[in-house]
Image (tube, grey):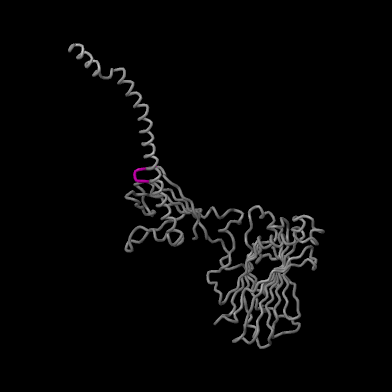
Amino acid sequence: MNQSRNRKLNKSEKGFTLVELLVSITILAIIVVPVLTAFISSANANSRAKRKLEATTAAQNVMENIKAVGVKAYLDSLKIGTAESGYTYAAPDAQGIYTLDNSSETAAGVLVPQQVINNRSFRFKAVFSPAAFSNESGTGYNDASLANIDNMNVLQDAFYVSGEDADQKIVDEYFSMPNITNTYTTETAIINALSREIDITILHTGDEDTGITKVRVDCIYKLDNNAATTKTVSSTVYDNSDIVNGKLRSVYLFYTPLYAIKNAAAKDTIKVFNNTTSSETKPSSISAKVYLVKQRTTDAQEVFESTYKVNLEVDEINSDQPVAWSPPDDYRAFTTILTNIGTNMLTDLKTEQFDSILFKSGSQSLNLIEKNKEYLGITTMEDASKVTRLYQITIDVFTEGSEESVYTMTGTADA
């Protein structure tokens, strides 16, 4: 009896066999290994993401610093040497490109300072290139003639911007008018018939000391030069009647050539009226610089640039000679025109983009292009030569001990 009971007990206490143990281990491995792999992959992904975030932060710090101070000031701040021995600054190559490369630990020269983010050091290769905004045809931003507006202020300067959107708005208004669409059945037909005149009226009242000056700009649109289709957009851009110590110095007209929407050799007309309503106003008080700034359009529109023409008319009342007169050879108008219309107008104005220049003083009209160029002091705008104004900046970020970039940032900054 006892022997039978012991045999039953021994049988019930029997353990796993080797086969059962191997099967269990295999099942456990099938379950655990993928889970561990997922954890490891997740940890690696998090580590890479963290490293990229740190590299992004480092690049952003550098880029924001450059944009805050400007490229030239930033580059000047990166120097090596001493005041006694003389500093060495970053130097451009023949294309004006600056390259500062401390991607390797042995890099020397003027470099972008390393950054430490979360106890990790980052090094940089930074390329400052103006070439992205310049090209051989001279249509790049860094090749364009730009008005000198660094000192513009509301006490002395008036400005007006007429862009492609404003012209397109007029086209849309025409296209919503049944009496217009009866004749011009498509938007293209309206655009092809469109002409534009921009009038700048400078009006002086009172004497030189207490006089008031107002400047109004009128954009006048017509279809096939039909007065019945006239649409006018007016804006007062300067009024010193409530400005203390305000006296007009310059007027800036920024405009986009009409061919931007017309897709043809459109002709614009620009008229400047620099007049006084009082004989007490001395001629010197109506002196003004007028900047006519033709803005660049899209590359697709540049094909029309070679055939684009502008009519310019300047009308000023000379209070010394209110009637017809013949100006002396050394005469100069009180209105001075500075412009980027025409790329070589000072040497051959007749072949440039002014179709005609009409100067009127009193009741005398003069349409001699060369003489009017002299009367109006027509010249290219200040700072009209090629000047680098924008840089494309590419920053590659490297970690210590790595020769491969972990992150690249591209941006644009002013010179």
Q: Residue at x 37, y 54 (%)?
A: 113
**Residue 73 at x, y = what percent?**
43, 62
**Residue 341 at x, y = what percent?**
65, 64
**Residue 301 at x, y = what percent?**
67, 55
Nearer to us in this view, 306 or 33:
33
* Quadrant of res 46: top left
Q: Residue at x 68, y 82 (%)?
A: 276
Nearer to us in this view, 351 or 358:
358
227 magenta-colored:
no
Nearer to us in this view, 53 or 396:
53
Residue, far left: 2
* Quadrant of res 315: bottom right
Q: Residue at x 48, y 51 (%)?
A: 410
**Residue 267 at x, y = what percent?**
73, 63
Q: Is 153 on the left or on the right of 124, as rendered?
A: right
Give the position of the N terminus as an image quadrant.
top left
Residue, far front: 1
Residue, far bottom: 280
| Span highlighted in magenta in the image | 399-403
Q: Is 234 on the left or on the right of 117, as rendered?
A: right
Q: Main secondary structure of the magenta part?
A: loop
In the image, residue 330 sits, relative to residue 186, either above or below, namely below
Q: Residue at x 75, y 55 (%)?
A: 188
